[in-house]
Amino acid sequence: MMIMQPGILAPLPKVARYIEFTIQNIAALSRVMKTLQTLIDGERTVAGLGVPLIRALGKDIPGLKVFPTQVGGGVTVPSTPGALWCWLRGEDRGTLFHEERHLIERVRPALMVHQAVEGFLHAGGRDLTGYEDGTENPKGKLAEKVAIVRGQGAMLDGSSYVAVQRWVHDWKRFDEMTEQQQDIMIGRRRRNNKELSTAPTSAHVKRTAQESFQPAAFLLRRSMPWVERGESGLYFVAFGASPDPFETQLKRMVGGDDGITDALFKFTRPVTGSSYWCPPMTNGRLNLSAIGV
């Protein structure tokens, strides 16, 4: 029986490592994918496969496509496709260090690190701005329904689609705003997380209100803050049973629906963007039958 990678629905860990790989040797790819099956437990390490990897194996996953570049309202959301994405989850940074180097060494014959980012839990699940992230995340059975593929056949059921972006915050711009201006930009009060009834249409919560789309664009967010080399921001992670809800929300954020740009872009911007398919598990191993492994 195929099940989801359990780390997708699990609570956020204390620390994390997000690693994106690119292909460096196609000839070794099939062999490395068999190795990957033994390395990924789906709980401490969640894995996603990108379009470049799947196409290099001569396969296709229904619905999966290259992350869409979005342009509008003076902002650009970039597309930086990756072959493999791994989310290492844990409570101890030293342990993750050893797990990361072991993983990189084992996949090295075919894959090389494109970028690696460390995430961490802040103030119980808040962005570095102090605002709670993922406030409207679905819970329980609804979370599973939103994030996990069902009814699509034996090779796809239990899988998930994930969109990942690294957002860089401009703290000078953020600090120049008053607390009221910051709240209006987000659409919630930072001090109590209450939504502002008078928030403008440009407020982030209004731009991305999941139930306001037709059909509703529900996602399961698993984002975490990051700080590295003098930069910082949010490593955005959103799982779905389809890539469509994320693309729908992103289109509205850049003003693709009505010309109104998400106020979030006043102080932060994404510098990466990639989409992956997270295979299901069978008997504690990644089930890669959908890509012929």
Image (tube, rainbow, N blue to C red):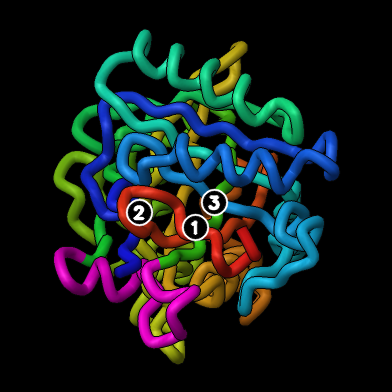
- Secondary structure of the residue carrying tag 2 is loop
- Residue 12 appears in view: yes
What number of labels is visible?
3
Q: Which residue is mark 1?
A: 278
* Mark 1 surroundings: few (<14), some (14-19) or many (≥20) residues within 10 A: many
Q: Nearer the viewer, residue 282 or 269?
A: 282
Q: Amino acid at mark 3?
A: Gly
Q: Which residue is mark 3?
A: 48
Q: Amino acid at mark 1?
A: Cys
Residue at screen point 36% across, 41% down: 41
- The first of marks 2 and 3 along the sequence is 2
Residue 180 marker: none
Tag 2–tag 1 contact (CB < 8 Å): yes
- The first of marks 2 and 1 along the sequence is 2
Residue at screen point 79% across, 65% down: 58
In the rendered view, would you say 26 is above or below 253?
above
Tag 1–tag 3 contact (CB < 8 Å): yes
Give the residue furthest to the top. Answer: 94
- Residue 129 appears in view: no
Which of the 4 quarters of the picture holds residue 144? bottom left
Q: Which residue is mark 2?
A: 5
- Give the alpha-carbon distance from disc 2 to disc 3, as whole Å: 10 Å
Residue at screen point 64% across, 30% down: 107
- Give the alpha-carbon distance from disc 1 to disc 3, as whole Å: 4 Å
Q: Which residues are magenta?
A: 139-158
* Mark 2 surroundings: few (<14), some (14-19) or many (≥20) residues within 10 A: many
Percent x, y of residue 211: 34, 81
SS assignment for the magenta stretch, majority: loop
Residue at screen point 28% across, 52% down: 6
Q: Is 42 situated left or right of 71 in this image?
A: left
